[in-house]
Image (cartoon, rainbow, N blue to C red):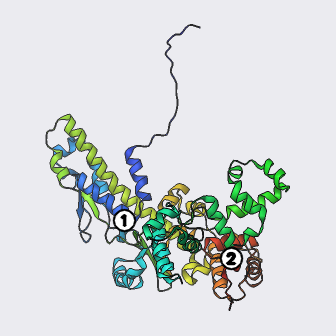
Amino acid sequence: MAIEIRQQFKLSQQLHMTPMLKQAISLLLFSRQELVEAVQRELLENPFLEEREAESGPATPEPENNRSSSEQDSPWPQEEVNRSAEWEEYLGEFSSQSRIAQQEYEAAEEDNNPLEACHAAEPTLEAHLMAQLLLSPLSEKQKNIGECIIGNLDETGYLTATDEEIAALAGAEVAEIAPVLSAIQNFDPVGVAARTLSECLLIQMRAEHYDRDPILVSLVRDHLEDLEKQRYKPLLRQFRIDMETLKDYIRIIQSLEPRPGGSLGSSTPCYVSPDIFVRKVNGEFVILMNDEDLPHLQLSPLSEELAGQNRSSEEKDYMNDRLRSAVWIIRSLEERQRTLYQVMESIVKHQRDFFEHGIYGLKPLVLKDIAEDIGRSESSISRITTNKYVGTPHGIFELKYFFNSALSSSDGGQVGSESVKARIRSLIEGEDSAHPLSDEEISTRLNDGLGVKIARRTVAKYREELGLPSSSRRKKHL
């Protein structure tokens, strides 16, 4: 077969995202702290941007007849720049009340949101385990061994040192390691300090009393690889069980935690500053944008001074690029604040019962509802609600918190899943510790008392999401 060279024409369409469009999308995703850092970087890099005082009024464009001939002949998009430079302050442009009324409630915002509500440091796995070790009945020598064990855990909670290495570090005998290791493995989270996945799961099974089933123990101890690769037929023949029984075993194994240390965060403190506030004033909910530490941008006078100067084509290209970038970030920031305000306004409309009465008033809500209400795409709603927080009369919440699935009620209506989770937590907190409520009993109470139709499995799922143990682990013997 002969090889030949041919020329062909092909017509195709591709979606191409410009750098400016990518920047605008990224601004929607940024948290408040990330946004401030991004704006500060742009101020340092772009000579056509400057920060103006918050109390100063917006720039007023010059009349057309007063412009110099150099500005009119300039290739720079001056008219578009001047229109974009007319950037009203966020609070005055987007707030649902007057500037004077806003100032009356600025002091109240700080009182309602103390520093403790904006700062939270997640405990490390090491600190969490050390606190339990110090309160345990172990001897001082055993606690010293325990410190060496905890110090050799990786970020997922697995032990990376051998008994001999731990004994050498602690100055103890190898035989003294096992009892301390067993005690730590039953600390919270259960299964920590295991050396293999199989050992980790077996420890959790003993805590949940699943180890009474020899088939389940054998599956975890000897056949995890077969389950992972879905080699089910040999297991069905070996244990003489049907596929439905094997699926039940797999569901139990999947309910265990393979990374017991992964649920605990690092020691890095997490700061939360609300992007927006919702307050009730004279019977109506008022939305206030929080732009206290967000720089107010405007075009630098340098852009007008350079407009009439003769420059080389390369210099003009560079300055045009930086000028367009300056205009774009100003407009992108304005669009971000406008979208955030519209989304919050729609959330208040859909979740008014929450703002009136608290979490029990939370209704089912999905991104599509907000998108249709304000005429935006679901992807834009998803971006603008990520890592954004709102200060409400009931506390500070992430915007994602207001979106939850629906459960049917006996009267034909719907109840939000977050509201049901709050009811489950309330029932468990008020139970008799000697006779804790089972998932089936919680399901019955929700159905009889509140008319919420919820299955036992759904109760178990929500309980696990809340980090609440099962009834057998909550039971306290008097």
Left or right relative to 163: residue 431: right
Q: Earlier in the sequence, mark 1 or mark 2?
A: 1
Left or right relative to 20: residue 368: right
Tag 1 residue = 33
Residue under the image location 72 percent in, 48 percent down: 230
Where in the figure is residue 104, as x and y percent of width and height?
Answer: 35, 84
Q: Looking at the image, which is closer to me, 358 or 336?
A: 358
Report which quarter residue 77 is drawn in.
top left
> Which quadrant is the N terminus positioned in?
top right
How many C-alpha atoms fall within 10 Å of the one at disc 2: few (<14), some, or many (≥20)?
some
How many C-alpha atoms fall within 10 Å of the one at disc 1: few (<14), some, or many (≥20)?
some
Where in the figure is residue 136, as x and y percent of width and height?
Answer: 53, 82
Badge nearest the viewer, 1 or 2: 2
Q: Which amino acid, by three-letter code, is at mark 2?
A: Ser
**Up-down: is 237 above or below 475?**
above
Residue 238, numbered circle = none
The reply to whether residue 398 is in sight is yes
Residue 470, numbered circle = 2
Q: Looking at the image, which is closer to me, 124 or 276?
A: 124
Q: Determine the CA span between mark 1 and mark 2.
A: 39 Å
> Which quadrant is the C terminus positioned in?
bottom right
Q: Residue furthest top?
A: 2
Q: Looking at the image, which is closer to me, 232 or 151?
A: 151
Report which quarter residue 464 is drawn in.
bottom right
Where in the figure is residue 332, as x and y percent of width and height?
Answer: 38, 56
Circle 1: element type: helix
